[in-house]
Amino acid sequence: MGIDNNRVDCKVVLLGKEYGGKTSLLERFLHEQFNEASPYQSTIGAAFGAKRVAVNDKFVILGIWDTAGSERYQAMSRLYYRDAKAAIVCYDVTEQTSFQRARFWIDELLQNEENCKVYLAGTKIDLVQSHTKPRSVDLHDVCDYGEAIKAAVLETSSKTGENVNDLFLKIAFDFTKDPYNFEKLEDAICDASVVNVSKADNNRRNCCHR
Amino acid sequence: MEDDATILSTGHVTSSESVDVPSDFENLASSNSQNSASNPANPDIQEEVFVSADDQYVSDSALSLPGPSSDDDISFRQRKLTMLMTEEDESELSSSWKEKKSHIFVLTEAGKPVYSRHGCEDKLSSLMGVMVAIVSCVHDRNDTIRSIVAGNRKFVFLIKLPLVLVAVSSALETIHQIEIHLHYVYNTIISVVSLSQLNRIYSTQKNYDLRRLLTGTDKFLDHLCNSMDQDPQYLLRAVKCLPLAGHMRDFVGQSLQQSKTDDLAFAVLVSSGQVVSICRLKEHNLDTTDLQVLLNLVNASATSFHAGESWLPICLAQFNPSGFLHAHISFLDEKLQTCLIFLSADRDAFFTLCECKKKVVAKLNKHKCLEAIHLAYSKADYTVSKVGIPELWHFLYKTNNISQFTCPEFSVPYHNEKQRQRLFGLYQEMHGKIHNPAAPLKLHYSVSDEETLLAWVASGFELYATFSPLVTKNQAISAVDRLLRWIKHREDELFMMRTLTF
């Protein structure tokens, strides 16, 4: 993962219903890959991955916890969102129940970690675009809900990579906006291997968050 | 119909005893009786119920005694079960389902389906209802049902309240071997939910649907059930080590020692499902069954771990059935072959263990261990020809004190799946005879048209060897001597003779 020590600046947790695409989202962000051939494998326990991104001449190391969606690990998920700076709550745009589950997670999360920023990520948008499956979660409904809880909303596809980097870059960018966080960050030297985001292209393809 | 049923018991059950059957079981029985009327039981099938008190095994010698008398109630119910398994419910159970040799069912004591090896457990609720009826019917007489034999089918029950595990097998396995399989299934379920959590749930909610907690666990159980049908590790209750030069294994062990931290109980390195080395706390041993459950979990879900480093709770029944250990699992190569597992008692130790992993990997690289491991598993297993005994075709050798075994890869004449299955069946049969609880044997020698088989249990080892059918007894015995010398000579390479401690 290219990180020499285990320093993590920003702890991010992925939450959401099982089969919601959390692991694929992380896989796309960390390794830029999507394994279409392998059958669905439910995550057991939790997996951790970290990646360094550069924002405004600073490096931010995102440490991301991918949690299991199944009920058995529900109690355990609390361990992972403790002190998390950001939570990506995933729902499958083709499955209404996954959105209800996302709302459950947000309620629970905000009760315990009120300072954690919430990012609502619709997943599998490529299925809707290719007409493989009909959309069941309306984007406007999600945006209305997102506005009410001050959460950013993005629809993503781990298969095509659409909006995936933008999502994580936005998390990193929002993190650096807090001057307290900003001070502690490591200076970024010009390095082509890391993704760079400038102020200008942030929020670029973001649908309704300002 | 009563005449063809014999019931054997330890004497606690007699026909004069009346049995109180709960009303819902009566309903179940009466709804089934209509089915039976249209489908009379095959009179050729001899049905026997073996019932034992105080968890005592009913020995085979006792089976030949005539039963005191038939017992309408039990025989009626178990006949229902046989018929459900063989002829009934055409609508729900397809013929391919019935043809499966070995079925395993897990249900709760309230009759709620938890797992079925074949088919969807939801559709089997009536079948599971009958199973619960049989269990409670015997339980009402302060006795515990162990097994039923009907024709060539064996019904084996393992009652671990709140769970009931049932196996139905028409393979050659003995009842004792099937019981061991059920124990493995039970331990796998416990590894996910823990015994104390299970008891807590069922003390308050008798009809809880355990599948809610077991989501995603089916793949472990399926993988386990399939392995038990072909992998000698479950038959022998021993693990297989990756053959590796002794000094290299020592380097791996020393590398694992680097991970010593507070609350770290075990560090295990495995490669393609075979153990390379283990490092443990001085005061704790990693039990073989626990290790097998852990390895099954890793093997069954190799691809789901490769996203990064995984962290999951696991309950090892022999280590501590009421608590969870936390497993840090990471693969050390792209091909997902070599896997490093840390088991810690501290649930917040994840990042500490990430550091440990780096130390271990650095040390492994220093001694070029990963290359050696890679070479060892790409070479695959050794062939029996390496032993240099032409009449020896295959063997299984288990060292008893460290519960490890070795065997060569299957070669001619066991080169195809059918022959391999047949040989495994023969090993099961021999193992069953040698370990017959009623009359354990030390040596078993048999000759058939196809091969000569020899099984030998001594104080330190168990050996099952297959020879050409033309071999004489003296030749076989001298071949075994040479084989034992050959193994002794390569002990360091084939087995993990030492486990280091932190």
Image (cartoon, rainbow, N blue to C red):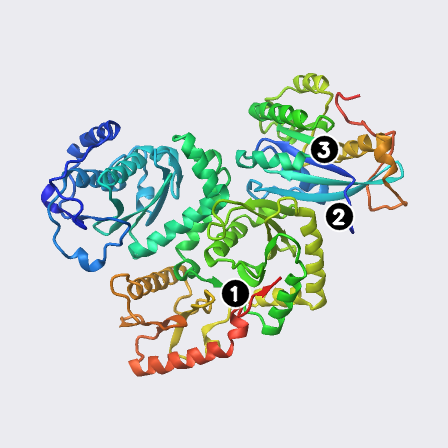
* The C terminus of chain B lies in quadrant: bottom right
Residue B344 on image: x %, y %: 60, 51
Mark on residue A6?
Answer: 2
> Which of the 4 image quarters holds residue B276?
bottom right
Mark on residue B241?
Answer: 1
* Numbered disc in front, either 2 or 3: 2
Q: CA distance from mark 2 to mark 1?
A: 33 Å
Marks 2 and 3: same chain?
yes
* Numbered disc in front, either 2 or 1: 2
Residue that appears at 85% across and 39% down: A184
Instruction: For the residues labelled 2 and 1, say whether their Cβ atoms are less than 8 Å apart.
Output: no
Q: Is residue B147 above or below residue B474?
A: above
Pointer 3 local density, CA inside 10 Å: few below 14, some 14–19, many at least 20: some
Q: Which element type, helix, strand or loop, lies under badge 2?
A: loop
Pointer 2 local density, CA inside 10 Å: few below 14, some 14–19, many at least 20: few
Instruction: For the residues labelled 2 and 3, say whether their Cβ atoms are less than 8 Å apart.
Output: no
Q: Is residue A210 above or below residue B14?
A: above
State left or right for residue B161 relative to residue B341. Answer: left
Q: Which element type, helix, strand or loop, lies under badge 3?
A: loop
Residue A58 on image: x %, y %: 87, 39
> Which of the 4 image quarters holds residue A197?
top right
Residue that appears at 61% across and 35% down: A77
Q: Amino acid at mark 1?
A: Cys
Nearest the camera: B249 or B127?
B249
Chain hosting mark 2: A
State left or right for residue B35 relative to residue B404. Answer: left
Residue that appears at 38% across and 33% down: B122
Q: CA distance from mark 2 to mark 3?
A: 29 Å
Residue corresponding to mark 3:
A162
* The N terminus of chain B lies in quadrant: top left
